[in-house]
Amino acid sequence: MTTTAKSKQPSEAFQATLKDLKLMREGGVLYSHTPRRKEQTRIKLQKHKELVELGKKEGLSAKFISHELTKLESNCLLCNKRFIESERYHAFLCPECDDKARRQEYKETQEEKKKEELPIERYCDAILDLRPSYDFSYEEALKLWTEGQKEKEDRTNAAIQQMIERVRHRVKPEGMTNKEWQREKQGNKVRAKEQGVRTEVQRDRDDKFKDENSPNWIMRDTLDKITCICEVDELRAGECCKTCNILRKVHEYMLDKFKNVAEGRSTII
Ligand SMILES: [Zn+2]
Ligand SMILES: [Zn+2]
């Protein structure tokens, strides 16, 4: 298709690229930060560049291009169904197509996760009798995510409530005797303890205790302090520094141990 100077109408190629770009999804809540997502971002940037170049060639202004990109659609880009205003939670897809796209993307991400799972992850799932995360259905993952959000919200609310209570209990209510006031404060403390409310100080103390006593954290801490003087050229030639040479053996040994336990061939635990 040729464009004349008179009609600055975008070409079909431009329209097609524009549609492709609008259909490329942003990171969803269930599957961000995966290698696939990174690759999609790369493709998206590439497509965006293409669109701008196409537009330039056709004499379209940058302002027009960016306007076209962010412009809401009146019809679903996939099924062409008209939007009802209340349904417009996704700018370019109708709810049905949006749901279908989400499920498809979830499925692909789960398959990718499964493919990229490391042996150690498989061993841990087996040892702890956990279901691998790639095994969760879309509904289950969504439910877990919603529950996680709710928990987070509850924790924030409890913290705010705690703060309010703390301020409130610094001031003796009018008409209350000192003795009553003391008893009231004591009662509140006991109640909080009974309800399992952890104060900030307690939380910090617990975190510190975990840091110092969990073998996992002790190992991380130790690893962090092991000096490494590997040179890139050395590594390319398959060599490494002396401490890393030891670590290589430790790593092999560790994987071996985990594998044996996971496959029921060890009495270590
Ligand atoms: Zn649709
Ligand atoms: Zn090293």
Image (tube, helix red, strand yellow):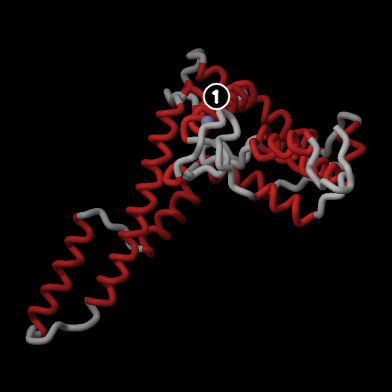
Picture coordinates of residue 143, whole percent (x, y): 38, 35
Number of numbered discs = 1
Q: Which residue appears at 67% of the width and 30% of the height?
A: 251
Picture coordinates of residue 245, whole percent (x, y): 78, 33
204 shown above or below 50: below
69 shown above or below 115: below
Q: Which residue appears at 69% of the width and 47% of the height?
A: 69
Q: Quadrant of residue 239?
A: top right
Q: Which residue appears at 75% of the width and 53% of the height?
A: 64
Q: Which residue appears at 72% of the width and 39% of the height?
A: 18
The answer to whether 32 appears left or right of 237 in the picture is left
Quadrant including the N terminus = top right
Q: Residues within 10 Å of mark 1 (few under 14, many from 20)?
A: some
Picture coordinates of residue 174, whole percent (x, y): 11, 86
The answer to whether 243 appears left or right of 201 in the picture is right
For badge 1, the amino acid type reads: Lys
**Is residue 269 at all visible to an observer of this figure?**
no
Q: Nearer the viewer, residue 224 or 153?
A: 153
The answer to whether 184 appears left or right of 24 in the picture is left
261 shown above or below 49: above
**Is residue 98 at all visible to an observer of this figure?**
yes
Task: List the single residue furthest toward the front.
Answer: 6
Picture coordinates of residue 12, whole percent (x, y): 78, 34
Quadrant including the C terminus = top left
13 shown above or below 210: above
At mark 1, the secondary structure is: helix
Ligand 1 has an atom within 8 Å of the beta carbon of the residue at disc 1 = no
Residue hosting label 1:
107
Q: Quadrant of residue 117?
A: top right
Q: Nearer the viewer, residue 149 or 60?
A: 60
